[in-house]
Image (tube, rainbow, N blue to C red):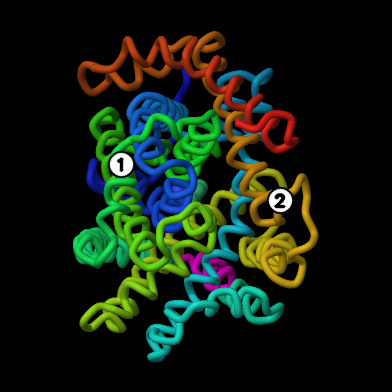
Amino acid sequence: MDIKTEKRSNFTGKLGFVLAAAGSAVGLGNIWRFPYLAAKYGGGIFLITYIVLALTFGFCLMIAEIAIGRKTGLSAIGAFKKISKKFAFIGWIVSIIPMIILPYYSVIGGWVTKYMVAFVTGQGHAAAADGYFEAFITKAGEPILWFTIFIGITALVVMLGVVKGIERVSKIMMPVLVVLSVFIAIYVMFIDGAWAGVIYYIKPDFSKFSFMTVVSAMGQLFYSMSLAMGIMITYGSYMKKDVNLEKSVHNIEIFDTGIAFFAGLMIIPAVFAFSGGNEEALGKGPSLMFITLPKVFNTMFGGQVIGALFFILVLFAALTSSVSLMETVISIIQDKVKIGRKKLCLIVLLGCILVGLPSSLGYGVWGGVKILGLQFLDFFDFISNSILMPIAAFLICIFIGFVVKPSFVTDEIELNGKFKMKKMFNAMVKYIAPVCLIVILVFAILDVFGILTI
Ligand code: PHE
């Protein structure tokens, strides 16, 4: 198939591309979501499952998406439509996902904003007290206020078109976040009682393996690497032809997984040190980081300043991700409806606030309302990560494996030298991934309906 490449502004070189894609990939997924899943689903066994999936499946899906973007020079919807009219619907499925994620992502972004302000204004000690998070989250107005502030800043960045500026700042901030995370992780290791947590996190205990380990690790992979939602296709469309795709993807993966790894190493041992590392403490879910980290900073010399710095950095990482989500949502709508960018930003902002409200209230006032036994936020998280993304990934694999054929992607990759993992790629997109994705999807559905407890 001959696809003409349109002219698009490009990233400068490999580093520019890697950093921009990493800006979207590195965010709350790494720092907030990864540690609580690893804590809940068996520690070391989750970690190893995640790494294996990242190196095999995650690698293949990411390189495929970026290659499709670069080859067509278009974003998801345009790209699929251009390649095959019949399969244009994949672009649509893929595009719904950021619309579901953005509102609840911003609810968590609001929690981070609240903690950032608390530390900056000298209330870090108070934040370390038992029940602080609980008291915050069970209020109706406050979480909504912070959520609105976070999504408001995101919309403002997009509206004013200062995305480039934010990305520039984040390029400086991200390496600082890496260094700080490593430092905090090392500090935590030496807290009394933390070592058991290090072992729990690093050493796989195969008796803790269950299908939910794989389901959750796979969902996390999509989420953290911004996969199966068309974002990497868009990033690929801006990538220059002379940049080595395989190496770039390796770099993004190492960066993304490295930050997640250290976030886990910061949080999980601290759960053992401060909350005893029992099942209840480890199973806290979305609140885990907020309950645990202030306690770490509270025991640290200069902890209030370090805590403030940490939350500022996390907020920036979250903002670069939420901005990339909102940009995607806006460009999808703009392709279809002719409407001014500013006006559209406002509409998307309002829409997000409305859709995000139940997620914000769900952890407090609406705690009793459940869908399929899940709170709103967990429900949106589940629908996007465990249902829609596996479906989207399955369709993408089938599309590449059997419709356009893997050479459509591998030819593009080989424009810059040999594709070392070509054999694995072919087997993965054609057979392994589709089969695994269907199995995972079925198990996720059985689990949520309580038909099978795995
Ligand atoms: N990957 C981001 C994170 O880990 C979340 C995200 C998903 C951002 C999709 C943009 C697009 O936080």
Q: Would residue 70 be visible to someone looking at this image?
A: no
Residue type at the position of mark 2: Leu
Q: Residue at x 75, y 35 (%)?
A: 449
Q: Which mark is residue 252?
A: 1
| Most frequent secondary structure within the magenta stretch | helix
- Image position of 138 (left or right of 231): right
Q: Would residue 255 be visible to someone looking at this image?
A: yes
Residue type at the position of mark 1: Ile
Distance from the alpha carbon under mark 2 to that under mark 1: 32 Å
Q: Indicate whether residue 110 is drawn in magenta.
A: no
Considering every residue shown, the one lying at the far bottom of the view is 122
Which segment is the magenta one? 150-161
Sequence order check, earlier mark of 2 and 1: 1
Residue 114 locus on image (x, y percent): 50, 78
Q: Residue at x 53, y 56 (%)?
A: 280
Q: Which mark is residue 374?
A: 2
Question: Dot 1: within a 10 Å radius of its alpha carbon, few (fewer than 14), some, or many (20 or more) residues?
Answer: many
